[in-house]
Image: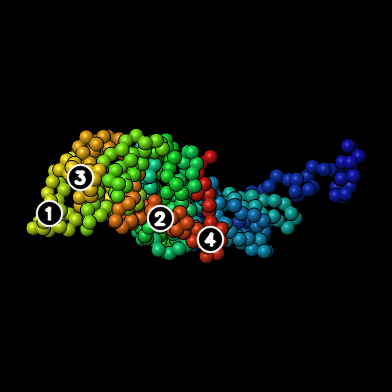
Amino acid sequence: MAGALLLACAAWGLTGCGSGNPLADRPYDASDQVGVAGAGETRQADPAKPLEVEATGGDRITDVTVADAAGRYVKGELAPDGSRWRSTGALSAGAHYTVRVSTEDEDGAQGRRTIDYETSRAKRVLRLAFGPQSGTYGVGQPITAELSEPVSDPAARAVVERTLRVESDPPVEGSWHWVDNRTLHYRPQEYWPAHATIDVQAALEGIKVGGGLYGGPVQGVHLTTGDRVEAITDASAHYMTVLKNGQEVRSIPVTTGKPGYATRNGIKVVLGQESFVRMRGTSIGISEGSSDAYDLPVYWATRVTWSGEYVHAAPWSEGSQGWDNVSHGCTGMSTANAKWFFDNVRVGDIVKVVGSAGATMTPFDNGFGDWNMPWKQWREGSALVAGKREGTGPADTARLRPQV
């Protein structure tokens, strides 16, 4: 071993093996050799401008890493001659970055410098609010994200969507869908599992969206699901079958919409419940003098559309329930059955209608008809999937991977 050390020393032409190899020395302080161009260390920088590190002495820059407080790195390019490093990735607004610079002098000795770099707060902030509020819901409940400003540019939409995280236990595949320039919905391919936990977060704060717009802070939500409750109404048979976790628990004679007021087919989601509501024909466009006019006190009403479709008690039509469709579009049943239904469903549960002469429930403009859109079409409403299809580069598919 001693002979090997002597040979190594001889190879370097040295009389000792501890101080002559520049690669073996501890890096020196390169504070006088590099600096941040265009910004003092105590001044907040414009996040819209690139961060530039430049060699100010005789050293050449060999490496630069820039990371924010959350550990997210900023991409950049180093000039071939080592004179300058320039960020190519977007900087966040109102962020603190740690810049670590490695240098090399003409003799090959290594230098190091660490620089604190702060960006100013954004003048235009994009805020995002998740829905629903934290709580327990049925397995059909979509997740919503409402933006404070419209985002129409595909690249900007992709930036926003990459910051969104939906993690479920047990895991399911899901996707965001841009409903319009301000609204996104998220759902799995199938319904959520019963008794699942769902965490929804966004790492949007400070992120450059585009056009001078930066993300603001976002409050996450935590959801759980209850039993899988599905109420399936066959309008042609005049019966509702209620399933709990796949097992039938009740069969209810009902009446649905008569000709001219046919109940919508398709999958709806419970939006809310009212133990009493006054229903008037004028709310659906029926004039007071019409033979179809009505003004009724209604009990145990479970809402499934914003336009006024409910499942509710209809004691005035009990003679037709199970036999004929005589309502103005709602699903009517006896007071006892309506009270049982009211007590055994929750917001987010599934109400499906088949066999009606009505149109199919629309996906977005009258409640949550999200499940009536085929999965392939739903996925194509994601800005990240659209980006893949257009060949704009790899999307961040991790947002679609549930917690494992």
Question: At 46% across and 41% down in the image, what residue appears?
Answer: 168
**Percent from the top left, x then y, of residue 333?**
22, 41
In the rendered image, the residue lying farthest to the left is 289
Q: Answer whether labels 3 and 1 touch (C-beta < 8 Å).
A: no
Name the element at disc 4: helix
Q: Residue type at mark 1: give it.
A: Ala
**Alpha-carbon span between mark 1 and mark 4:** 53 Å
Pointer 4 residue = 388
Which tag, 4 or 2, sits closer to the chain's start?
A: 2
Q: Residue type at mark 4: give it.
A: Lys
**Percent from the top left, x then y, of residue 352?**
34, 47
- Judged by depth in the image, the label closer to the viewer, 1 or 4, is 1
Q: Quadrant of the N terminus?
A: top right
Q: Residue type at mark 3: give it.
A: Ser
Name the element at disc 1: loop
Name the element at disc 3: loop
**Alpha-carbon span between mark 2 and mark 3:** 33 Å
Which tag, 4 or 3, sits closer to the chain's start?
A: 3
